[in-house]
Image: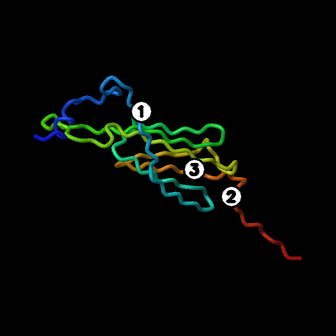
Amino acid sequence: MDENTRLAERSQTASPREAGREVSRITLTPAVDVFEDSQGVTVWADLPGVTKDRLEVKVHDGRLYIEAEAAVPTPGTLQLQHAEIRQPYFARAFSLSPDFDTSKIEANLQDGVLRLTVPRRDEARPRRIAVAAG
């Protein structure tokens, strides 16, 4: 066992304190893909390790917020030797145009990928105008 391994062993808990000092939480920006069509936008956000109970999606003052905390379990038979980030915290915000109907946003989380569907308001959707002849 070398010096680095011993340093990793000194703290086995996911405590916000380390060696008597506060450890700040690192906020990660999740990678997203945004697709737009005449019906609205669809946002796909990568949130590895996030479960539904640790995910919050909210809309306030024309902004869409995604906040989540990942659970990175360590199997009981293993001992953590090194971790870059013990409990990843994800946060991302988007400004929404008034053209979108925030009351009809749908969210689905599956296998660490969040899909948000944000529909356009009916009056903001393109529509075809019939032209009469004569």
Element on which disc 3 rests? strand
> Residue 34 vs residue 77: left or right?
right
* Neighbours of disc 2 within 10 Å: few (<14), some (14-19), many (20+): some
Element on which disc 2 rests? loop
N-terminal label among 1 and 3:
1
| Residue found farthest to the top | 20
| Residue found farthest to the front | 3
Which residue bears the numbered disc 3? 118
Q: Which mark is residue 86?
A: none
Quadrant hosting residue 2 = top left
Q: Give the Cα separation between the discs numbered 1 and 2.
A: 44 Å
Which residue bears the numbered disc 2? 125
Quadrant hosting residue 52 = top left
| Residue found farthest to the bottom | 134
Element on which disc 1 rests? loop
Which residue bears the numbered disc 1? 24
Q: Give the Cα separation between the discs numbered 3 and 2.
A: 13 Å
Q: Nearer the viewer, mark 1 or mark 3?
A: 1
Q: How is the image coloured?
A: rainbow
> Residue 40 vs residue 84: left or right?
right
N-terminal label among 3 and 2:
3
Pick whichever, 110 or 27, lies toward us. 27
N-terminal label among 1 and 2:
1
Of the 4 image quadrants, the one containing the N terminus is: top left
Asked if the residue at tag 3 contacts the one at tag 1, i.e. Cβ–Cβ closer than 8 Å, the answer is no
Pick whichever, 83 or 130, lies toward us. 83
Asked if the residue at tag 2 contacts the one at tag 1, i.e. Cβ–Cβ closer than 8 Å, the answer is no
* Neighbours of disc 1 within 10 Å: few (<14), some (14-19), many (20+): few
Q: Amino acid at mark 2?
A: Arg
> Residue 113 vs residue 129: left or right?
left
The correct choice, above or below, for 117 with respect to 4 in the image is below
- Residue drawn 63% across and 61% down? 38
